[in-house]
Each structure stands twice: as structure tokens, then as C-alpha cells.
Amino acid sequence: MKEKQLTTTIQELDFSELSASEQQLVRLARVATQSSYAPYSHFHVGAAILLENGVFIKGANQENPAFSGICGERSAFYNAGANYPGVDITAVAIAARDSNGFVTEPCSPCGLCRQAMLEFERNAKQPITVLLVGERCIYRLPSVASLLPLCFTDF
């Protein structure tokens, strides 16, 4: 038997330690939770992405009774792909809140979102910085791939 170890480096930061563009992403992700339609889960997720051309894009989760909605992360990424084809994404911030307010600890994307975001990162051939936003702190990860080290791929 062989054993392998996977490691991911996560920086834990205060808002004041972020760059100006990262602070703007965090603010926009929090605002995006207000556009969430989550009458079933009552869990509101907002995502904001920064494109290489300096454009910011927001997305929010949208639910329906058949539970076939879309998460906030994919909402933002697909919006970028549809409206700015060929323009790479450089960073994403993800925030979440429930009936008690914003989550205390950073919330990580679901597996489907991780895989979808990874496709954008692979197509860009450069890492996308990931900011996971909590009230207590913010996690900064160097890439989407760091969230999904054993990803499904045909590469």
C-alpha cells in the first residue's frame, strides 16, 4: 500500500489585510447575498468575481421548489462567461448569510461549484485567487485547484 498526502495552504486574514481590489470583492460578495432567492434553504450565498479587464461581476444563489436552482458561485462565473467571453477571471470572493446574519466562519463552495470554477481556471491557464468570507476572518486560497485537488478532469 502506498500513502499520499494532500496539503492546501490557506491564509487566514482580517479584512484590513486584503488589497483594495480584494476588499471590493468582499464587499460585493456580501452585497450579492441580498440578490439571493433562497425561500427553501434560507441560506443566501453571494459571489463576486474580478475579471482581468478590471470588471467586477456579482452572482447569487437562486432556488426553486424542484431544488434545481443555481449556486451563487456558478451564477457569477456563468454570467462572466456569457457576457465577457475570453476574458479571464483573476479572483472570486464568496460570502454567505442565514437568518442570523453573515456566517461566522468562511463557507466553502459545493463540489459542483468547485468543478465549474476549476474549468474557468484551467481555460485561463492561470490561478484564480479564492476568498472565503466569514465574519470572524477571511480565508485566501491561491487557486480554485487548491479547493479541489482530486478533481474530475480529462487533462
Image: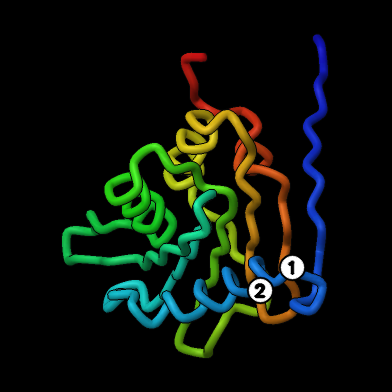
Q: Amino acid at mark 2?
A: Gln
Whether residue 95 is situated above or below residue 127 in the rendered picture: below
Horizontal and vertical percent position of residue 51: 50, 53
Q: Amino acid at mark 1?
A: Ser
Query: According to the image, label 2 marks what residue?
Result: 23
Horizontal and vertical percent position of residue 104: 66, 79
Q: Is residue 22 left or right of residue 71?
A: right
Q: Nearer the viewer, residue 25 or 74?
A: 25
- Mark 1: which secondary structure? loop
Q: Residue at x 23, y 54 (%)?
A: 68
Horizontal and vertical percent position of residue 94: 54, 64
Mark 2 and mark 1: Cα distance apart in space: 6 Å
How would you rate the neighbour count of disc 2 (Cα within 10 Å): few for under 14, some for 14-19, many for 20 or more? some
| Residue 19: image tag | 1
How would you rate the neighbour count of disc 1 (Cα within 10 Å): few for under 14, some for 14-19, many for 20 or more? few
Q: Is residue 91 left or right of residue 88?
A: right
Q: Nearer the viewer, residue 47 or 49?
A: 49
